């Protein structure tokens, strides 16, 4: 007991010493400099800034005054960091977030091994394709959890017909297909099958995508062979991925589809006056252009249903929007996460010097056909309580699906 007390006293002393050092060396000016740089960058490069101020009525001037005062009165790095975190969280945007600084990331993952992040769109030239790394792990690929989370097994008549990256099952004439991730980097086993020394980062991503597309086609064919006349695609908990999502959409229809084109930031003037409450002298987004189009491949041409929840976000919301707005699919579940468009060519980033963190911000926005920014989430056609007990969830889904016409 004496030894334990001594250890606890030593630890308490170290903690007090660290806190005292933090307070003694805190430099509010350095943190305010970082904060000023963040405001400048957000005014010019945060895609959802105007929407949130105008439609969610976030008072940017009041938020700025509060954050400035909090940093001045922080008296420690910890409290200053918490002030900046509160500032970022005030926007309620899943793609606006504090992340480890670039130096930290470089030390953990060499630049040649950088992997795609959720909602990342590669719009750059394909000729410049640095090596992916020495193996899939070095390239940033990890194995995600691809299994069903929704309790389909509790549904009467459920029969599992496939496992692996895209699990499948049938309930009568309803085929169920699980897509847990739209990011190639969440399929490490698939990466290992196509990886070879010297392969480029983008080439590896496309090779994994091609393999997974073939597996999705095989999964759909299996469901058809088991008598499926309707297809339910389960994207609950799917937090997004990459532009691969449009290729998946094309599998589920033979029609020509269209939707509003994603818009990137293109501020044509100094917009920092927004932090004083003044109107921005120019828009932050490029003008609305021609609609995006997509031709279906027709692997599946029957009725499509989509199951979503509050964690269905980012690229998964793009998936939902394409199929829902073009009347290809009916959506069941909860309003989606409201992540919307994410990062084109990595998005925009503000590095901090007083803290080992950066702020990463989305540099594109997607809008639904009614003009709503996708960060508000997509409402289902048929609301379902997704947090009910397993048996109740399965019964409610089956009842709702049974009310849908087959043709």
Image: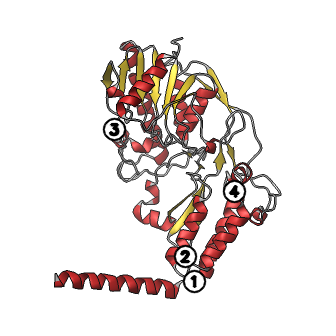
Going by the image, does 27 lie left or right of 56?
Answer: left
- The quadrant holding residue 38 is bottom right
Q: Is residue 389 above or below residue 61?
A: above
**SS of the residue at dot 4?**
loop
Give the labeled residue for mark 3.
193
Q: Is the Cβ of the residue at disc 3 closer than 8 Å to that at disc 1?
A: no
Badge number at residue 354: 2
> In the displayed structure, does residue 347 sit left or right of residue 285?
left
Quadrant location, the C terminus:
top right
Image coords of residue 180 (percent x, y) = 42, 37
Residue linked to disc 1: 27
* Side of 361 where 242 appears, left or right: left
Looking at marks 1 and 4 on the same chain, the residue that comes earlier in the sequence is marked by 1
Q: Quadrant of the N terminus?
A: bottom left
Which of 11/188 is in front? 11
Of marks 3 and 1, which one's residue comes earlier in the chain? 1
- Determine whether label 3 and label 4 are within 8 Å by CB: no
**Residue at point 32%, 25% (across, down):** 162
Q: Which residue in the protein does label 4 denote?
A: 58
x%, y% of residue 76? 52, 80
Q: Is residue 199 above or below residue 226?
A: below
Contact (Cβ within 8 Å) of mark 2 with mark 1: yes
Report helix, strand or loop for mark 2: loop
Name the mark nearer the viewer: 3 or 4: 4
Quarter of the figure with residue 322: top right
In terms of sequence position, does the residue under pointer 2 or pointer 3 come before the other?
Answer: 3
Is residue 262 something that shows in the picture? yes
Mark earlier in primary sequence (3, 4): 4
């Amino acid at each position: 007991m004496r030894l334990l007390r001594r250890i606890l006293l030593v630890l308490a002393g170290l903690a007090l010493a660290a806190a005292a050092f933090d307070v003694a060396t805190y430099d509010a000016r350095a943190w305010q400099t970082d904060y000023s740089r963040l405001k400048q960058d957000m005014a010019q490069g945060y895609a959802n800034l105007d929407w949130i101020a105008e439609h969610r009525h976030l008072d940017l001037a009041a938020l700025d005054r509060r954050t400035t005062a909090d940093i001045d009165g922080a008296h420690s790095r910890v409290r200053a960091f918490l002030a900046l975190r509160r500032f970022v969280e005030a926007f309620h945007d899943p793609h606006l977030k504090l992340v480890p600084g670039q130096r930290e990331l470089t030390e953990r993952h060499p630049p040649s091994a950088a992997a795609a992040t959720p909602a990342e769109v590669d719009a750059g030239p394909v000729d410049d394709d640095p090596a992916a790394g020495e193996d899939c792990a070095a390239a940033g690929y990890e194995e995600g959890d691809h299994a069903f989370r929704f309790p389909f097994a509790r549904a009467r008549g459920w029969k599992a017909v496939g496992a692996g990256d895209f699990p499948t099952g049938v309930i009568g004439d309803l085929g169920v297909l699980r897509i847990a991730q739209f990011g190639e980097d969440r399929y490490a086993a698939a990466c290992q099958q196509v990886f070879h020394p010297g392969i480029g980062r983008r080439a590896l991503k496309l090779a994994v995508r091609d393999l997974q597309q073939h597996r999705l086609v095989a999964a759909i064919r299996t469901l058809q062979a088991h008598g499926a006349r309707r297809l339910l695609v389960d994207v609950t908990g799917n937090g997004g991925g990459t532009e691969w999502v449009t290729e998946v959409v094309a599998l589920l229809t033979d029609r020509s589809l269209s939707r509003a084109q994603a818009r990137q930031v293109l501020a044509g003037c100094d917009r920092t006056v927004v932090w004083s409450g003044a109107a921005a002298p120019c828009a932050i987004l490029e003008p609305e252009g021609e609609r995006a189009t997509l031709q279906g491949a027709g692997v599946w041409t029957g009725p499509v249903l989509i199951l979503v929840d509050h964690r269905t976000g980012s690229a998964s919301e793009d998936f939902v929007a394409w199929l829902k707005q073009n009347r290809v699919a009916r959506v069941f579940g909860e309003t989606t996460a409201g992540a919307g468009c994410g990062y084109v060519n990595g998005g925009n980033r503000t590095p901090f010097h007083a803290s080992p963190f950066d702020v990463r911000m989305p540099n594109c926005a997607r809008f639904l056909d009614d003009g709503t920014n996708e960060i508000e989430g997509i409402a289902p056609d048929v609301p379902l309580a997704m947090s009910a007990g397993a048996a109740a969830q399965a019964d409610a889904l089956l009842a709702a699906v049974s009310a849908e016409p087959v043709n």
